[in-house]
Image (tube, rainbow, N blue to C red):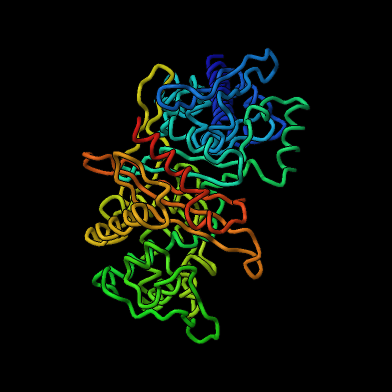
Amino acid sequence: MTKYIRRAAGLCALLLVALLVNAARVQVVQAPSYDRNPANRRPAIARYGQPRGDIVVEGRTVTGSEDTGGQFRYERTYLDGPLYASVTGFASQLYGTTLLEGTEDGILSGSDPMLAPLPLLGGLTRARGTGGSVVTTLDAAAQRAAYEGLDGRRGAVAAIEPSTGRILALVSTPSYDPGLLSGTGPAASRAWAGLNAQADKPMLNRAVRQTYPPGSTFKVLTAAAALDSGVVEDVDEPTRSPNPYRLPGTTTRLTNEIEGCEDASLRYAFTWSCNTVFAKLGVDVGLDDMTRTAANFGFNDRTLRIPFSVAPSNFDLRLDRAQLGLSSIGQFDTRATPLQMAMIAAAVAGDGTVKKPYLVERTTSRGGATLTTTGPRILHQAMSASTAQRMRELMTDVVEKGTGTVAAIPGATVGGKTGTAQHGVGNSGTPYAWFISWARADGAMEPAVAVAVVVEDAAANRGDITGGGFAGPIARSVMEAVLGS
């Protein structure tokens, strides 16, 4: 009898082990596939069953959560939604998450294992913690100055702290209210359809996801390449630059809109933006050195994240000499994001290094404990320190006596470069207005801010555009805001 009891007990133990193994298989091994199953609503219910963590700007939360009492209980809300939409993105029960709401979703939703009640077991128990906070690098005054300066026109602003790479402002207009996409009702669906139907594309982040021909602002890079390669040794010596300049191997002749560009010095050509001088300089520097310099400034980088992805800026690697001449003045297929052009201005303002731009200062738990931090990191040495110093002199000349005087700020040294980017068949499109700049308060050890501004729908008065009449005042107001804070 005892033998049969032992056998029965052994069978029961075996069945129990089998049940435990199967439970572990379902709950651990197959759990991800069940979580991804569209028919499983439990993760979504749990996700929206508690308030979402907040995104913070200078100690002030710009996001919130509203208790609706429904199945998806908490909906995302936004304070000054259009002002920060190009940073926060949206968190929608219907359409998912974008920008910081997307890249930092683990922290904000509480699903990151670091926020689990039992962190060491969080991966096994899959317990959801309370949502944490994402503290940004933004300067609130600079962000508002950029947004109000654009005044709803199609365009974008990016501002960086040169010494660290901290992003101080990131604005794209026209903008939208991300809160309109919260919830699961018909209002959110109508808002989604309406936003996607608008010709101005308010949900397009022009600061990091749109590339433009940079026009004459690209001459900063060409000048740096000419100085570092030794093609130009003295910025005040005449260059051998004819006016007009015939592009090599073609009958196309480049001209200028101002006098004095023939054989002009680099200083004069930069101050007054002589196309002929810089096209020839690019050809003289050569494709290898130009592409190397462009890469060192950040062009053709498909890996840049801030933490959300940035569209790669383009400088073609295969160009004939005529195409190289046009590319060297920011035309042909050369294209850049406003963030990329701010990185160029920041490299000049600093010691010639390109710092990795970043938007998240740190992440914290709901109680304020720091989870992760971000610090300065050098991406590339774009130019030598001596070349950076000479470029600062050239950019300062533009603001003090050249095409960028509108950006001058009392009590500060400001360097800048205006640009007009033509586009369309036969340059028939309205030119884009560009301005890139940096500012250092008198008495300060290093510059406080570098800015890039592009205005897409500038009026057709080309004189205003090339003189910084559209983008220059916006850049100045952003720099003033940073210097003031």
Q: Residue at x 54, y 69 (%)?
A: 332
Q: Taking 108 as reference, is 390 left or right?
A: left
251 or 35: nearer the viewer: 251
Exactly how many numbered labels are in the figure?
A: 0
Q: Residue furthest front?
A: 259
Q: Quadrant of the C terminus?
A: top left
Q: Is residue 18 visible?
A: no
Q: Taking 87 as reference, is 75 left or right?
A: right
- How far from the left and from the top, in percent, is residue 56? 45, 26
Q: In the rendered image of this protein, does residue 197 appear above or below residue 92?
A: below
Q: Residue at x 63, y 27 (%)?
A: 179
Q: Quadrant of residue 376?
A: top left
- How far from the left and from the top, in percent, is residue 462? 56, 59
Q: Quadrant of residue 441?
A: top left
Q: Is residue 276 visible?
A: yes
- How far from the left and from the top, in percent, is residue 20? 55, 25
7 or 358: nearer the viewer: 358
Q: Residue at x 59, y 35 (%)?
A: 97
- How far from the left and from the top, in percent, is residue 235? 27, 68
Q: Quadrant of the N terminus?
A: top right
Q: In the rendered image of this protein, does residue 401 appear above or below residue 112?
A: below
